[in-house]
Image (cartoon, grey):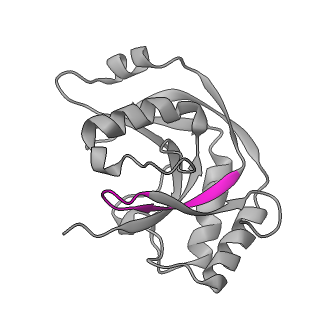
Amino acid sequence: MTRGHSVLQVPVPELDGFVRGRTAHYDPAYLSADPDLVHAHVTVLGPFLPEVDDDAATQVARVAASVPPFAFTLQRMSTFPDGIIHLLPDPADGFRQLTDGLCAAFPACRPYEGRFEPEPHLTLDLTSPSVSETSTRGALSLPVSCHADRVDLVWYEPGRCRRLRSWPLGVGAGS
């Protein structure tokens, strides 16, 4: 039985069509019907808490409020050793500020369970005999200009993926 988990992420609607298509190809059970969930994202802390109470929500809102909305560009593509093709945001400072603030507020939630050093990125695809950085780049129109304006709390579980909450960047408590 697969258990779900939550993630704090910055949505990137500019690439949602592409990422939804790849999610449908690889993991259709993770393709959400929730119209508020943007599949294309940059993770700022995951996994996160299994349940978010009012105190935790206040802490997330405080961290989100401490980082003003920011623009970034996605153009530089790379591949992790495990074959994950991704885009690196430029600049990445806003994502790092969010991750650092959230890690300080929630020290028990280690990014990627401590397996990897957090590097802001947007996952695109997985290498295979038919998928490479070159083929992925050819399927996209790069660079992509983006704007980060919120942090979403998203629940990932087969057949039950959905956005749970959202907090705006640079302003008071979120929705």
Q: Nearer the viewer, residue 82 or 165?
A: 165
Question: Which span is picked out in magenta?
Answer: 150-161
Q: Is residue 136 left or right of residue 172?
A: left
Q: Quadrant of residue 123?
A: top left
Task: Identify the residue at the far right of this view.
Answer: 171
Q: Can residue 21 be seen in this snapshot?
A: yes
Q: Position of residue 35 (x, y in %)?
A: 54, 47
**Residue pictured at 29% horizontal, 50% vertical:** 29
Answer whether residue 120 is visible to the viewer in this image.
no
Residue 101 picture quarter: bottom right
Q: Please determine whether, in this image, residue 53 is positioned above or below residue 63.
A: below
Label tally: 0
Q: Please state the horizontal and vertical placement of residue 2, each as a whole percent of the image.
A: 23, 66
Q: Nearer the viewer, residue 19 or 70?
A: 19
- Apparent side of residue 59 relative to residue 77 in the rendered image (left or right): right
**Above or below, 144 relative to 27:** above
Q: Is residue 25 magenta?
A: no
Identified at 47% across, 44% down, the residue is 39
Q: Position of residue 61 (x, y in %)?
A: 71, 70
Q: Nearer the viewer, residue 165 or 139?
A: 165
Left or right, 128 with reference to 31: left
Q: Nearer the viewer, residue 46 or 36?
A: 36
Task: Work out which quarter of the rendered image holds the N terminus and state it.
Answer: bottom left
Instruction: Say which quadrant the C terminus sits in.
Output: bottom right
